[in-house]
Amino acid sequence: MVLQTLSLLNYKNFESQSFDFDNKINCFVGNNGKGKTNVLDAIFHLAIGKSYFNPITTQNIRHDESFFVIDGVFKKLERDEKIVVSFKKGQKKIIKRNGKIYDKFSDHIGFIPLVIISPADRDLIIEGSETRRKFIDTVISQGDRSYLQNLINYNKVLAQRNALLKYFALNNTFNKETLEVYNEQLNNYGTEIHNKRAAFLKQFIPIFKSRYKAISNNKETINIDYKSDLFEGDLKSLLQLNISKDKALQYTSVGTHKDDLNFEIDQYPIKKFGSQGQQKSFLIALKLAEFDFIKQQSGVSPILLLDDIFDKLDENRVAQIIELVNNDNFGQLFLSDTHPERTEIAVKQTHQSYKIFKL
């Protein structure tokens, strides 16, 4: 998987900009605020259909403009694939592949395998469970379209059930039969989601542990523990058991939308007991394991985006990552940095072809 060209029009701070990329390593260098991260985000946008850093579409339009266009040409399995993402205020976002508009954005997910490593990933440790569910869902969805569809359906039914609970409270009424219809649907979709998440983690955690060992010189034990209500029983029974609580809260209090991942170091939460260095190593191992997993599932090396990684990591970890990248298993790499000299020294160590773009 290689991104050959990228064109931006009114995207974030870019009025109009085009790039022709190297097949291996591409570096964006310049002072803060020049748009290095925005270029990486545009590439992410082409692959996933939304921004990594700001999912509110209107806020990705350049100031005082009414639309944006991102245009990229990829080489996948020896075939050119032109992907265009465009949005105009007051209209729906459009994603096109080779001139044909997708009916559903979900049909595009996974077509351009991609992994991003960014300082923003720290949210996976410090934020709430929704951030970690989003991580696991994004990884699985890139290789499993039925999982993504189940997730979409589950969230739709969940919203309907929550609206019904609010209706009951506002009108001082209750209809058990109507609620049971939603319970049945949530159970069907939720069970599939739970089983896929459990199966994914069984495969993913050993890969993650191997990556952590490779980038960390420490001997601590790390783990990911999957927390889910569905380990306590089937979702239909749990929904019935918690109906009084749900009526009082006016929303659904159990289900796969409450799942979480506990990130542990020596059997303690890494959020509280891990050093900054250990947390950084944990996150990078997590993302490199994501790379490995997606490659195994798709048979294609994902594009790898490294955002501001030199500023956020010590030289030892950067050297270890560069060493990992200096491997035929990796495909195309994009990175951003504020120091051109530091970047060039690092990428020269890979003995791969590269381009440096000064913004």
Image (tube, rainbow, N blue to C red):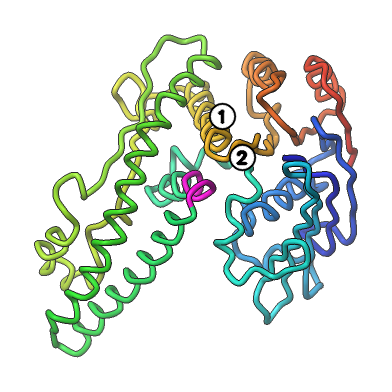
Quick one: quadrant of the N terminus?
Answer: top right
Please, what secondary structure does the residue beneath circle 1 have?
Answer: helix
Q: Position of residue 83 (x, y in %)?
A: 75, 58
Quote the CA–CA distance across marks 1 and 2. 8 Å
Mark linked to residue 106: none
Count up the numbered dots.
Answer: 2
Q: Quadrant of residue 322?
A: top right
Which quarter of the figure is the C terminus placed in? top right
Q: Secondary structure at mark 2?
A: strand
Task: Say which residue appears at 86% left-offset and 35% top-offset.
Answer: 22
Against 176, residue 100 (above or below) is above
Residue behind mark 2: 115
Asked if residue 339 lies left or right of residue 51, the reply is right
Name the residue located 38 percent from the left edge and 28 percent from the top edge.
Answer: 270
Residue 126, image quadrant: top left
Residue type at the position of mark 2: Val
Residue shown at 19% from the left, 57% from the top: 235
Q: Residue at x 90, y 59 (%)?
A: 16
Residue 40 within the segment the image draws in magenta: no
Left or right of residue 233: residue 320:
right
Asked if the residues shown at circle 1 and circle 2 are in contact, with their CB atoms under 8 angstroms apart, the answer is yes
156 or 113: nearer the viewer: 113
In the picture, measured across the screen, residue 349 lies left or right of residue 170, that is: right
Outermost residue, front side:
78
Nearer to me, 165 or 101: 101
Residue 179 x/y as whole percent: 19, 77
Looking at the picture, which amino acid does disc 1 mark? Answer: Leu
Nearest to N terminus: mark 1 or mark 2: 2
Q: Position of residue 167 (x, y in %)?
A: 25, 84
Label 1 sits on residue? 288
Magenta range is: 138-144
